[in-house]
Image (spheres, rainbow, N blue to C red):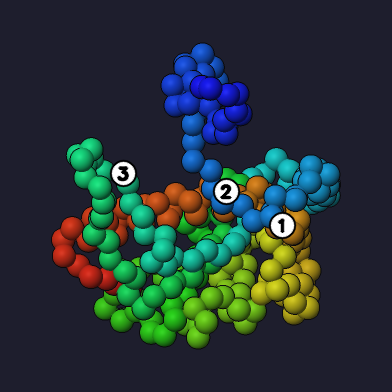
């Protein structure tokens, strides 16, 4: 070059990165999940305070060593945007990659579920919320009687549906297991006077995780729902290859 001129730096090269990963086996290259700014501001102090309160509550109830009496419940949504299946093999010369998938009959579906620290999900009946129409009777015959189905104009859970599920499904199936401790988020649908009064009467302690921290502290969000959605996505892809256009409610 005839004159010295600083060139723009574009970061390490691919070769440098490959060699770096070879030298440092303890690290790997992974794709991160998107995280909103408010969630990224959750502090260690908030997390420590939550676990301190949880530990004190479990000791007070004398159930710290009984995982069948420690529950978490939360809801999630199944919708067309979550239907992304596994990777597939394709020629390097191909510029565009497409995969047949199917949409969900009736659109968005909400699932409300409870799970114990003992991974005991079967006895705590889920609530499935559709936007308009429920399952036909000939489909419900093969579904466990404990399962509950409902409709909501918004397709999401609301205070009325949550309270009904909590009283008629969750608590009834706890049987004589009370007292119990429930970990949940502080969403408006979960917190109202009627629910809190009912929980006190039934000897149920409810602990809310700190705001915007469910991606770290809510067990269903952290591990369970991720696997559920991935398996559902794989199913949608498999059905897409059969020529089906929608995943029916049943």
Q: Which mark is residue 94?
A: none
Q: Residues within 10 Å of mark 2 (few under 14, many from 20)?
A: few
Q: Position of residue 101 (x, y in %)?
A: 27, 61
> Which residue is pictured at 75% across the width and 50% down the height?
42
Mark 1 residue element: helix
Q: Position of residue 174 (x, y in %)?
A: 60, 61
> Which residue is pictured at 68% across the width and 60% down the height?
184
Q: Nearer the viewer, mark 3 or mark 2?
A: 3
Q: On the image, numbered disc 2 is attached to which residue? A: 222
User: Mark 3 and mark 2: span between their CA atoms?
Assistant: 22 Å
Q: Mark 1 or mark 3: which comes first in sequence?
A: 1
Q: How many marks?
A: 3
Q: Which quadrant is home to the C terminus?
A: bottom left
Q: Residues within 10 Å of mark 3 (few under 14, many from 20)?
A: few
Mark 3 residue element: loop
Q: Residues within 10 Å of mark 1 (few under 14, many from 20)?
A: few
Q: On the image, numbered disc 1 is attached to which residue? A: 38
- Disc 1 to disc 2: CB gap under 8 Å: no
Q: Which mark is residue 87?
A: 3
Q: Residue furthest front?
A: 2
Dividing the picture into quarters, in which one does residue 196 lie?
Answer: bottom right
Q: Nearer the viewer, mark 1 or mark 2?
A: 1
- Disc 3 to disc 2: CB gap under 8 Å: no
The residue nearer to you, when weighing 17 against 128, is 17
Q: Mark 3 or mark 2: which comes first in sequence?
A: 3
The residue nearer to you, when weighing 166 against 192, is 192
Q: Mark 1 or mark 2: which comes first in sequence?
A: 1
């Amino acid at each position: 070059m005839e004159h010295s001129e600083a060139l723009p730096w574009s970061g390490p090269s691919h070769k440098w990165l490959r060699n770096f990963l070879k030298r440092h086996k303890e690290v790997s290259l992974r794709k991160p999940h998107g995280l909103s700014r408010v969630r990224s501001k959750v502090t260690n102090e908030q997390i420590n305070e939550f676990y301190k309160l949880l530990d004190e509550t479990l000791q007070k109830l004398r159930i710290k060593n009984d995982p069948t009496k420690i529950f978490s419940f939360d809801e999630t949504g199944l919708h067309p945007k979550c239907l992304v299946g596994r990777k597939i093999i394709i020629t390097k010369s191909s510029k565009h990659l497409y995969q047949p998938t199917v949409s969900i009959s009736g659109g968005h579906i909400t699932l409300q579920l409870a799970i114990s620290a003992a991974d005991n999900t079967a006895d705590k009946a889920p609530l499935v919320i559709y936007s308009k129409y429920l399952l036909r009777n000939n489909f419900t015959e093969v579904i466990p009687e404990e399962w509950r189905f409902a409709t909501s104009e918004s397709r999401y859970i609301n205070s009325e549906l949550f309270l009904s599920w909590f009283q008629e499904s969750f608590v009834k199936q706890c049987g004589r297991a009370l007292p119990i401790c429930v970990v949940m988020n502080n969403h408006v649908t979960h917190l109202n006077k009627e629910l809190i009064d009912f929980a006190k009467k039934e000897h149920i302690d409810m602990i809310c995780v700190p705001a915007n921290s469910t991606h770290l502290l809510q067990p269903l969000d952290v591990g369970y729902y991720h696997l559920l959605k991935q398996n559902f996505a794989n199913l949608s892809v498999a059905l897409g290859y059969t020529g089906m256009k929608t995943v029916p409610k049943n």
